[in-house]
Image (cartoon, rainbow, N blue to C red):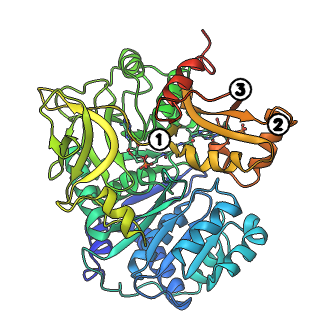
Amino acid sequence: MYESNYLAGNLRASSQGRDQALFAKTQDGRTLSYGEFFKGAETYAAALMSKGVLPGDRVAVQVDKSIEVLQLYVGTIIAGGIFLPLNTAYTPAEIEYFLGDASPRVFVCSSKNKEALLPVAKKCGVAALETMDGDGSGSLPDLAATQMAGVKAVPRAKDDLAAILYTSGTTGRSKGAMLSHGNLWSNAATLRDYWHFTSEDRLIHALPIFHTHGLFVATNVTFAAGSALDFMAKFDADDVLKAMANATVLMGVPTFYVRLLKHEKLDKEHTKNMRLFVSGSAPLLSETHDLWKEKTGHAILERYGMTETNMNTSNPYDGERRAGTVGFPLPGVEVRIMDGETELPRGEIGSIEVRGPNVFQGYWQMPEKTKEELREDGFLITGDLGMIDDRGYVSIIGRSKDLIISGGYNVYPKEIELMIDDIDGVVESAVIGLPHPDFGEGVCAVIVKDPHADLSDKTIMDAISTDLAKYKQPKKVFFVDELPRNTMGKVQKKSLRDDYSDTFIAT
Ligand code: MLC
Ligand code: AMP
């Protein structure tokens, strides 16, 4: 029934014949078997088709986390559509850009946001606006409930698109990374094998499901192995610690581990059922790695990925998991360190480039951007700086792209600088990331104002907060007389980061 659809067929195959096996348990105690999950996904596929979704149509989704969202994801794939998840923190102004750029056939939002988003959807020519809430209710679930399961999957090949995930851009404009059926499945199968996932596993799923980490790494690997999910609405250290009694794996961003380490009950006893702790999306401090090992006896396995590539490298399952490194290139993935057009030898720092079946198809309707970052030989210029040591471990040393990663969310300074510079009385601004004990990096704005302007941090925040997602908003604003510049006139963000480095860290 699913065979002709590359991704859906593969996701389904691993649990074939095991329809009674547990797929997910939610926090309110609801359990869902694989059979029930896929039946529900088929009704979502039928609902989307009844709304006119044709192969290649985009289905944009900004809703609270629920199992039904995963059914909608798989249902979109079964219907031959392209799933386009959006961060729940995005404001209507931010959503307008995505809907305008991707022209989805269907947009699914929370019922609480419907009033604000209806005019936005109309303006962008979206044919159908549907609702879906965290408790599984809404107009789309209602429609799905009237549909029959058993719909035949729409044929889709390996190179057809399965998803578009927007990543913010250095110019301030977000870019839609196009991921194919083959991109997603190859990575899921590789990670299942590399991390020894089996049907005996139970993964604590506390990540959001609008990004690669929670949607593809955690969920697709679970499908690929026929494992089960402990499905949580959001990260809560208490809940996660409790779940460890029956679970085997946790995937998280470094903030998860930092917060769990603060929990008084974290010890070897509470983690004894667990076999694997995975960290990624942002750098894990060696200090966090070492403390975790000391308290739990487990070495966190750090891996490195990107929206454009899924996962690229991973520390080994067996063998030394080296703190401060992201391990080895995954099977089938090539990593090289470049200085311009020259490949550097081991031990030298340069630009990290990756190639493999995991690497995306390019940016949606941005051929020029795609050309800038995806080389003709298939290597993607990641924008990360790193090196490979003599044993083959890859380390990320920094970034050539001007990017802040806060609690695993990417924040591109340019987007915020453009908004701040638009405020009356602002001469110019620089947005930087400063060391933050909880989020890794905290967003800060350094602003030069007109000496006669009556501006305070409050007036700045008032001016940008309506249109900017909360996690992107500066947690601190500084006013200065001028920004430091080099001889070329370029703002020296490193010097600013040094000047304000203690802002969030008590000295
Ligand atoms: C929430 N806030 C954040 C924030 N998350 N601010 C900065 N950065 C963040 N990441 C804001 C809240 O709005 C709130 O504002 C205040 O900070 C404190 O919120 P909180 O209650 O402590 O936050 P919480 O809801 O617990 O969320 C923190 C978190 C969450 C770390 C659990 O951000 C999270 O789940 N992050 C994971 C992101 C992720 O999945 N990244 C993967 C990308 S994929 P106020 O003012 O209202 O108090 C990728 C590729 C790869 O990168 O390699 O994986
Ligand atoms: P995103 O665009 O959200 O997919 O973020 C991808 C970026 O996150 C990468 O280019 C890296 O800069 C960063 N990243 C992901 N994993 C790690 C890691 N383990 N260590 C350091 N940075 C990471």
Decide which of 407, 103 is in the foreground and name it.
103
- The residues tagged by marks 1 and 3 sit, at their Cα atoms, a distance apart of 23 Å
Disc 2 marks which amino acid? Lys
Q: Secondary structure at mark 1?
A: loop
Seen as rendered, the residue at the extreme top is 507
Q: Earlier in the sequence, mark 1 or mark 3?
A: 1
Q: Earlier in the sequence, mark 1 or mark 2?
A: 1
Q: Secondary structure at mark 2?
A: helix
Give coordinates of residue 275: x percent, y percent.
31, 34
Q: Secondary structure at mark 3?
A: loop
- The residues tagged by marks 1 and 2 sit, at their Cα atoms, a distance apart of 26 Å
Write down the quadrant of residue 455 in the picture: top right
- Residue drawn at x 39%, y 62% is 369
From the viewer's perspective, is the residue at label 2 or at label 3 nearer? Answer: 3
Write down the quadrant of residue 127 in the picture: bottom right
Q: Which residue is mark 2?
A: 458
Q: Which residue is mark 3?
A: 481
- Residue drawn at x 23%, y 57% is 189
**Does mark 1 have its CB less than 8 Å from ligand 2?**
no
Q: Is residue 275 visible?
A: no
Please give left or right for residue 77 compared with residue 111 in the image.
Answer: left
**Does mark 2 have its CB less than 8 Å from ligand 1?**
no
**Residue 402's disc number:** 1
**Quarter of the displayed picture in which ligand 2 can be seen:** top left
